[in-house]
């Protein structure tokens, strides 16, 4: 599969009250090989479409009618509860740490991205690929804000500078291979850093994938 393409038959529902943006994303995804099975302008319509079509992926704005507060986020939580295998990407116009953390606590196949990232088509499509592949993806701007606002009692203080870098890339949903490519080191070196991070954070040994998610949640919660 191409890094910017979609698995054949990947079915997606798009929700945003901005018709131009919604149509633009639909056109982009269709051109990249996705199958857009529905579009919604509010959370109620989104939930109806998702229940009827059971897509592989939902892309939704965080703010929609009628109050333009957290309708998209609330719908995402309902979808995760009813259909946990549906991947979800929530788009936001601004970095909202609290809402992002609430969303990402839902586990795998979920992501939070700023709308401005959609402009970078290759990166946006790669993000969708990672989410549908099982990753949790955090917008880099959120990662930077969390680093800049660490609490006084920081559980990550035990980590080295390089381990901080590795954990930040883990929080963006990158695999060990992806982290190695980003940092210009070998995959074996990254694996050693990851093992050290999981050990230093005293995470329960309940499976490598689950421990990685717990490490990311610890990172997000340390802001």
Image (tube, rainbow, N blue to C red):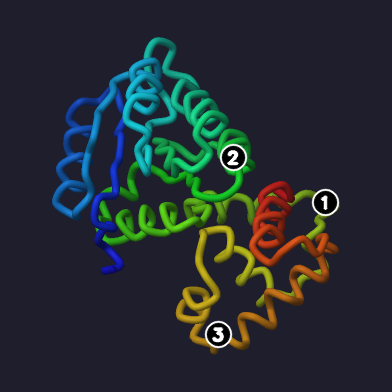
| Whole-number angstrom distance, CA of label 2 to CA of label 1 | 18 Å
Closer to the camera, 52 or 1? 52
Q: Residue beneath label 1, please?
A: 152
First reached walking from the N terminus: tag 2 or tag 1: 2
Residue 14 coordinates in the image, percent (x, y): 30, 33
Closer to the camera, 51 or 183? 51
Element on which disc 2 rests: helix
Residue 109 coordinates in the image, percent (x, y): 50, 49
152 displayed left or right of 99: right
Q: Residues within 10 Å of mark 3 (few under 14, many from 20)?
A: some
First reached walking from the N terminus: tag 1 or tag 3: 1
Rendering quarter of residue 25: top left
| Whole-number angstrom distance, CA of label 1 to CA of label 3 | 32 Å
Residue 185 coordinates in the image, percent (x, y): 54, 87
156 displayed left or right of 6: right
Residue sitting at x 49%, y 30%: 79
Residue sitting at x 49%, y 53%: 137
Q: Nearer the viewer, mark 2 or mark 3?
A: 3
Vertical order, 174 against 107 (above or below) = below
Vertical order, 88 against 194 (above or below) = above
Q: Residue beneath label 3, please?
A: 187
Vertical order, 110 against 63 (above or below) = below
Residue 97: which numbered mark, if any?
A: 2
First reached walking from the N terminus: tag 2 or tag 3: 2
Residue sitting at x 25%, y 28%: 39
Element on which disc 3 rests: helix
């Amino acid at each position: 599969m191409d890094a910017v393409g979609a698995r054949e038959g990947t079915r997606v529902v798009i929700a945003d009250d901005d018709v131009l943006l919604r149509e633009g994303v639909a056109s982009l995804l269709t051109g990249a090989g996705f199958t857009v099975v529905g579009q919604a302008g509010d959370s109620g319509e989104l939930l109806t479409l998702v229940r009827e079509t059971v897509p592989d992926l939902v892309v939704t704005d965080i703010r929609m009618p009628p109050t333009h507060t957290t309708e998209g986020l609330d719908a995402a939580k309902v979808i995760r509860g009813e259909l946990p295998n549906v991947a979800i990407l929530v788009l936001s116009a601004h970095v909202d740490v609290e809402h992002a953390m609430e969303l990402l606590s839902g586990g795998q196949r979920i992501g939070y991205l700023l709308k401005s990232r959609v402009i970078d088509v290759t990166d946006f499509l790669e993000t969708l690929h990672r989410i549908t592949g099982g990753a949790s993806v955090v917008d880099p701007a959120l990662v930077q804000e969390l680093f800049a606002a660490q609490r006084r009692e920081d559980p990550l203080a035990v980590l080295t500078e390089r381990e901080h870098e590795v954990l930040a890339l883990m929080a963006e949903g990158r695999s060990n291979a992806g982290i190695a490519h980003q940092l210009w080191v070998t995959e074996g070196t990254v694996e050693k850093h990851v093992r050290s991070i999981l050990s230093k954070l005293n995470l329960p040994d309940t499976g490598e994938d689950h421990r990685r998610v717990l490490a990311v949640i610890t990172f997000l919660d340390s802001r």
